[in-house]
Image: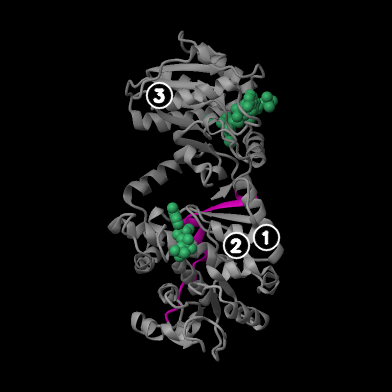
Amino acid sequence: MKIFSKAQIYEGDRLTAERQNISSTDLMERAGTQIFNWMHARMQGAQVPIHIFCGIGNNGGDGLVLARHLVLDGYNVKTYIINYSDKRSKDFLINYDRIKNTTKDWPVLLSDAEELPEIHPNDIIVDAVFGIGLNRPVVNWVKTLFMHFKASKAFTLSIDIPSGLFVDKPVEDEDAVVYAGFTLSFASPKLVFFLPETAKYTVQWEILDIGLDQEYTFTTQTETELISKYEVLPNYRPRDKFSHKGQFGHSLIIGGSYGKIGAVTLASKAALSTGAGLVTAFIPKCGYQILQTAFPEAMVITDDSETTITNINFDIEPTVIAFGVGIGKHVETVKTFEAFLKTNKAPLVIDADGLNILAENKGLLKLLPPECVLTPHPKELERLIGAWANDFEKLDKAKAFAEKYKIVLVIKGANTITIFNNKQFVNTTGNPGLATAGSGDVLTGIITGLISQGYHTLSAAIFGVYLHGKAADIAVEDSGYESLLATHVIENIGKAIVDLFAQPEQHEAAQQSQEN
Ligand SMILES: NC(=O)C1=CN([C@@H]2O[C@H](COP(=O)(O)OP(=O)(O)OC[C@H]3O[C@@H](n4cnc5c(N)ncnc54)[C@H](OP(=O)(O)O)[C@@H]3O)[C@@H](O)[C@H]2O)[C@@H](O)CC1
Ligand SMILES: Nc1ncnc2c1ncn2[C@@H]1O[C@H](COP(=O)(O)OP(=O)(O)O)[C@@H](O)[C@H]1O
Ligand SMILES: [K+]
C-alpha cells in the first residue's frame, strides 16, 4: 500500500473533486459519512455519551459531518468547537451551519482550558481537532485539552491522524499529542504510525476508502510503501514442476567464532528452509562437528583457524554469500574480509559483526558489490551512519548512506524499514517475540536463501523481512511472545509461505466485498 505524502494527499483531494465533478464539501461529506458508518456498525445505536471535539479546519469539518449523522440517528452526542484560530475553513463553516440546522443542541465553543467538559471513562471521545494540516506546535490550552482526554481514560477515536501529530516532523512535546485507541485515516496510512517514536500515539488504525480518483492513486509514485502480503505476492517466483536444486542456487554463509557457531547454524537452516538449493557454511574448525550434527543438510568448509575466520578461501561458486553472523571482529577476520571484498563478485548480505567491521573500517564500504544487502539493528545502524536526533533524521541519514554506497539497507525493528534508491518499504509483519537471541541470524539466512533462488537483492530483502515476521506471527500463536525461539521462526517459514496463497477467512472476504 502506498503511503502518500501530505502534498500528495491534498493533490489527490483536489484532483478527485475535479475529475468526479464534485465539490470539496461533497468529499468531506463522504469522509464524515464513512466514519459514521464505521461507528454505527459497531455501536448499533448504543447510547454511550460521544464527545466530538472539532477544530476549525477540514479535520474539524469531518468531525461536524460525523456529529450531524450521529445526531440524526439518535446517538447521545455532544459537539465542541476547539476555537484555536479564527481562520475557519470554508467546508468547516458549511458543516457548522448544517449541524446548527440539524439540532438545537449547538456545538459548544471552547477557547481556553477553563471550561473543559467532564468526560467519564466509559464515554467516547472523537478527536477531530487537527488533521494533516498541523504545521506548528499547539498552544498551551489545546495541549491541556489533549491531556484531559488522556486523563479521562475514555476510548479515543482520532480522525485521520491523532491531533498534535505532524505527518512529516518529530513530536517535540509528548503531552501535546492525542493518544488514540483507534485512528480512522483517509487516503493512506501515515508514515508516523510506523516509526518507533510516534507509533504509540495510535494503538490501531484503519483506512477508510473515500473514493479518491483511482488513476491518481494507481499512478502516483510514493517515497514510502507499506508491505503486506499483497505487495510481496506479485514478486513471488513460482517453481516449475521439472525444476531441480541446481536452479535454486548455492548459498555460502561465512561466519561463526568460538561460542557462536549457533548463529551460522541458524542462518544456514533459514536459507535452506526458504528454498536455497544448496547451503555451505564457512566456519572456524571448532564448529565443524557442531554444525554437521545440528544441521546435516548443510555442507561445511572450515577456516584454517580453530576459533575465528582468518582466511576466506573456498573452491565453490556460490550464488550469494552472507557474511558476519557470529563472526567477531578479530584483526585477522577484518584482513581476510577486506581481501575477500576486493575479489568477490557474488551478491552479498552483511549482518552483525560484518556491519561493525564496516563501521570501524569505512574504507571497506566502497568495496561492496552494487545492491549489497546490509541488515543493521538500530545500534549497528548508529555505528554505520552516526547518531540521529529523531526518526525523520534517522531515515534521511539512512537514505543518504544507502544512496552513497548503492546498497539495500534493512533497518531492523518493530516495523523494519528497507531502504533503497531513496525509497522506503515499511514491513507490517512481526511481533515482540522476535526480540530474542538469533532472530536476526534467521533473517540473514532467509534473505540469503531468496537471493540464492534468483530474487533481486531488494525483492529478497523486502520479501525476506515479510516472511520472517509472518513466520514469527504464526509461531507466537503456539509459543506466546516470551517463549519464541529463533528456531521456531525457522520452523514456521513454510507456513508463512503457504499463507501467501491462503484464501481470506469468510468474515474477511465479506468485509472486503463490502468495502468494494
Ligand atoms: N483525502 C483526504 O485526506 C481528505 C481529508 N480531509 C480532512 O482534511 C484534513 C486536513 O484539513 P486542513 O488542511 O484544513 O488542516 P487541519 O489539520 O484541519 O488544520 C486546520 C488549520 O489549522 C492551522 N494550524 C496548523 N497548526 C496549527 C496550530 N498548531 N495551532 C493553530 N492552528 C494551526 C492551519 O492553518 P494556518 O493557520 O496555518 O493557515 C491548518 O490549515 C485531513 O486531515 C482530513 O481530516 C477530508 O475532509 C476530505 C478528504
Ligand atoms: N518488537 C519487535 N517487533 C517486531 N520485530 C522485532 C522486534 N524486535 C526485534 N524484531 C526483529 O527481530 C530481529 C532481531 O535482529 P537482531 O537484533 O539482529 O537479533 P540477533 O542479533 O539476536 O540475531 C530483527 O529482524 C528485528 O526486526
Ligand atoms: K485528528
Q: Residue at x 64, y 67 (%)?
A: 360
Q: Amino acid at mark 2?
A: Leu
Pick out the residue farthest to the bottom.
315
Q: Are marks 1 and 2 in contact (CB under 8 Å)?
A: yes
> Is 15 left or right of 269, judged from the image as shown?
right
Q: CA distance from mark 1 to mark 3?
A: 45 Å
In the rendered image, residue 235 lying in the magenta stretch gets the answer: yes
Q: Nearer the viewer, residue 382 or 480?
A: 382
- Identify the mark at residue 401; answer none if there is no mark: 1
Q: Amino acid at mark 3?
A: Ser
Q: CA distance from mark 3 to mark 2?
A: 42 Å
Q: Is residue 418 visible in this depiction of the protein?
A: yes
Answer above or below: position of 443 versus 508.
Answer: below
Answer above or below: position of 306 versus 1.
Answer: below
Rendering coords of residue 31 (x, y %): 52, 31
Which mark is first along the chain, 2 or 3? Answer: 3
Badge 2: residue crowd in 10 Å (few <14, some 14–19, many ≥20) = many
Answer above or below: position of 516 versus 87.
Answer: below
Rendering coords of residue 175 (x, y %): 52, 30
> Is 137 left or right of 80, judged from the image as shown?
right
Query: Which residue is label 3 attached to?
Result: 152
- Identify the mark at residue 68; answer none if there is no mark: none
Query: Which residue is label 2 attached to?
Result: 409
* Magenta stretch bounds: 218-241
Q: Amino acid at mark 1?
A: Phe
Which mark is first along the chain, 3 or 1? Answer: 3
Q: Secondary structure at mark 3?
A: helix
Rendering coords of residue 280 (x, y %): 47, 83
Answer above or below: position of 218 versus 32.
Answer: below
Q: Quadrant of residue 500?
A: bottom left
Q: Secondary structure at mark 2?
A: strand
Rendering coords of residue 16 (x, y %): 62, 37
